[in-house]
Image (spheres, grey):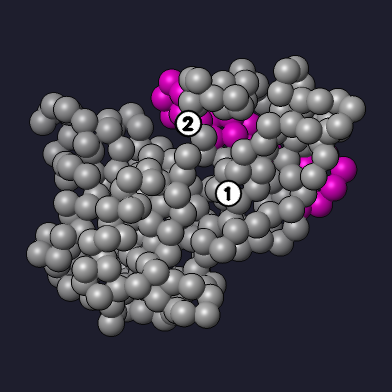
Amino acid sequence: MKIFGPNATITARREWTDGLATFTVRPDGWTLPDFEPGQFANLSLPEGEYWDEESGHAIRRAYSIASTPGLGVLDFYIRRVDDGQLTPRIFQRSAGDRIYMDERIAGHFTLEGAQDAEDLVLVGTGTGVAPYRPMLLDAKHRARFGRTILFYSDRYLKDLGYLDELQRMADEDDSFLFFPTLTGDVAESEWSGLRGRVQKHLAPAAYEALTGKPLTKERCQVFLCGNPKMVATVQEDLEALGMARHRKREPGQIHMEKYW
């Protein structure tokens, strides 16, 4: 799609820590299409060296939507990549600044494609938690699963955006289990929760100790989103348990979305 100028406005910006923020974007003069939690939209900044005004060519990147449908705006949970072509420029923007957002929303990383299961297991690292937030708020599709279990990892406590909201959801909903884990060197006084990479806690014995139930293909649908190395490692571990990648014509238990 050719881009000839901005078509949306940043209406809010929430800072989590340096280089990590949620941007709320509103379309200007057009209506957002319906979408499913877990899908994504493309953002771009049509300006400077990364935009050809005549051809309409511009650098664009896909970002998972971190908000629910029907709000008239979209939230994007974004980490700045200092040597990137787009995020450093997005992080120079504030509420009121204009941006380009594709009018098309796409992606197959949704609960709609998952089979009914006793446990819906969501595994996210970094900003890979973004598509899970609207999924957790999607009562219609979550009702098909007995429990929803979220494993969420980053290096430091300050990097766990939405932590308080997610913990509050878990406190108020017995069917939602939340397991944040930190991989960085964090003092005991700052963090008393789980430590180590998510794959450590997805080992069969560790998973069952945490959740009270086994991690098996008969009872689980597993979503993986974030660091490609994590996704590949966990996929391999799950396949060793007899699980298979989900495909449209070959339903399986593993659903994946790789970031960067």
Residue 47 is left or right of residue 229, and the answer is right
Against 23, residue 171 (above or below) is: below
Q: Position of residue 82 (x, y in %)?
A: 48, 20
Front residue of 200 and 9: 200
**Helix, strand or loop at mark 1:** loop
The dominant secondary structure in magenta is strand
Against 193, residue 107 (above or below) is: below
The quarter of the displayed image where residue 237 is located: bottom left
Q: Position of residue 119 (x, y in %)?
A: 31, 73
Against 93, residue 245 (above or below) is: below
Asked whether residue 24 is drawn in magenta, I would say yes
**Magenta part of the protein: which range?**
11-32
Which residue is under mark 1? 65
In the rendered image, which quarter contains the N terminus? top right
- Rendered residue at 60%/24% (across/down): 85
Tell me if residue 178 can be seen. Answer: no
Instruction: Name the mark on residue 14.
Output: none
Circle 1: is it few (<14), some (14-19), or many (20+) Cα within 10 Å?
A: many
**Helix, strand or loop at mark 2:** strand
Circle 2: is it few (<14), some (14-19), or many (20+) Cα within 10 Å?
A: some
Give the residue type at disc 2: Arg
Residue 248 is left or right of residue 55, and the answer is left
- Rendered residue at 61%/27% (across/down): 86
Instruction: Name the mark on residue 79.
Output: 2
Tell me if residue 120 can be seen. Answer: yes
Against 110, residue 72 (above or below) is: above
